[in-house]
Amino acid sequence: MSITHSIVSVLNLKDPHLHFSEDCVSSQSIRGVDSLVFSGSLSYDPPSSCPLCGSSNPGSAIIKHGTKSSLITLPSVSRRPAYLRLKKQRFLCKHCGHTFTASTSIVLPHCFISNNTRLSIALDAKMKTSEKDIAFRHSVSHATVNSLLQQLYQDFKVQRNFLPPHLCFDEFRSVKGVDASMSFLFLNAESGQILNILPDRRMPALIRYFMSYSRKAREAVKTVCMDMYSPYFSVVHHCFPHAKIILDRFHIVQLLSRALNKTRVNFMNQSKPHYNKLKRYWKLLLKFEDDLNDQDFKKWVCFPSLMREIDLVHFLVELDPELKATYELYQSLLTALNRKDPDAFLQACLNPDPLISKPMNTAIQSLVERKEAVINALTYSFSNGMIEGTNNLIKVIKRLAFGYRSFIQFKTRILLISNTLVPCHFLN
């Protein structure tokens, strides 16, 4: 086996015109860093025509005309920066008098970063790591990584004639380079695939965007799962004529638990003797009553005797009639949610105890106004669980990079890490 075959196999170089001598590997200092340098040559017979003037090559009109050396960045070898010092064959066209250099598949024309390195950068960009670390790992500048990511973003195409039947809407805190403070995210509720990320979540921008889809694609949408942000309701009614709105169950519970918590805080600030008890055990009040421990007696701070969890909660809610009425309504609504019983849920909302607190009454009125969306939440199995997980991933990406200035750069990293954007740009 020749040395050329060994080097080409190790470095994954596919060009058959590469040649390496026995003393081709050396250790040199490149930009102050100890690096591996592979010295090789690229040469082949003169081409049949000149790429500049287009004239053919009868009678040796194109001849070899010296070499040109270039230093090409390769992927690291044994965690050491690697470079290819390549002597490329030069050709002279006797017709037009211009010279040109031999081309190779390992690097793009007028570029000094190998295609393998570009692909390695794109694959590393799919990992949860900062772009600065990617640049350091591949011995390139941060600007080079940014440029490659911008090229990758060109592969992201939106199909305006297709939308999946089930969608999820949500938002996340955007970068400072956009006008709106929150950006919009929507994905396929069945597969969890991100469909697109928009810089603005406000209603005019969303309507303008979704109306760019074909009418057939918009009519194919059957359900949209989302939170209680009111502009989303208008967007769905305007753009998706056949879609049913599903109110995310987590946000329903969140709305009710916040109302109960406000009731507890209002009473806690008025009841000085029981202030510490209500402040310390607030989580037990928000817990589903069936999950409270009714078997084990234990010692609780602020209480002189042994008690069960359920006894402690009953003691706290009995301190105030308003807190008790609000707590009982909260538990009845949680029971209906867990059983997915829309009739029981609506019955509790439409016939509340007159003693319930003002925050809980406001929350109930909000749910009654969105009655159909609440019924759909208890009928369909879709939720915003996948999109909330994606939001958590987005926060991790932003934290790793210590923030982003460019929305496109931020969006590209999100699409790469979530496997929505495949780096096929450098595979061609």
Image (spheres, rainbow, N blue to C red):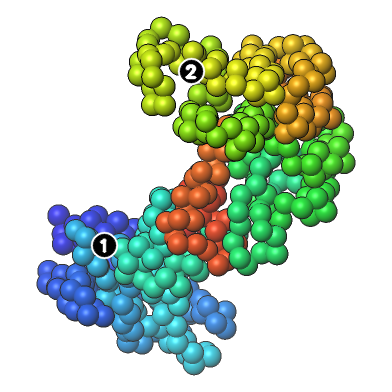
* Amino acid type assigned to the residue bearing label 1 in the image: Ser
* Amino acid type assigned to the residue bearing label 2 in the image: Leu
User: Residue sitting at 14 percent across and 55 percent down?
Assistant: 1
Residue 159 visible at all: yes
Compare residues 19 and 35 and report the one nearer the observer.
Answer: 35
Residue under pointer 1: 76
Is 229 situated left or right of 27 in this image? right
- Residue 192 sits in which quadrant? top right
Q: Where is residue 125 in the image (x, y as percent from the top left)?
A: 43, 55
User: Residue sitting at 66 percent across and 58 percent down?
Assistant: 181
Compare residues 339 and 23 and report the one nearer the observer.
Answer: 339
Of all residues, the one furthest to the top in this rendering is 295
Of all residues, the one furthest to the front in this rendering is 273
Is 345 situated left or right of 10 in this image? right
Cα separation between marks 2 and 1: 63 Å
Secondary-structure class at tag 1: strand
Compare residues 222 and 107 and report the one nearer the observer.
Answer: 222
User: Residue sitting at 46 percent across and 50 percent down?
Assistant: 396
Is 26 situated left or right of 329 in this image? left
Q: Residue 312 carries which label?
A: 2
Q: Where is residue 311 in the image (x, y as percent from the top left)?
A: 49, 13
Q: Where is residue 106 in the image (x, y as percent from the top left)?
A: 38, 65
Q: Position of residue 266 (x, y in %)?
A: 64, 36
Compare residues 106 and 329 and report the one nearer the observer.
Answer: 329
Q: Is residue 69 above or below residue 327?
A: below
User: Residue sitting at 52 percent across and 30 percent down?
Assistant: 273
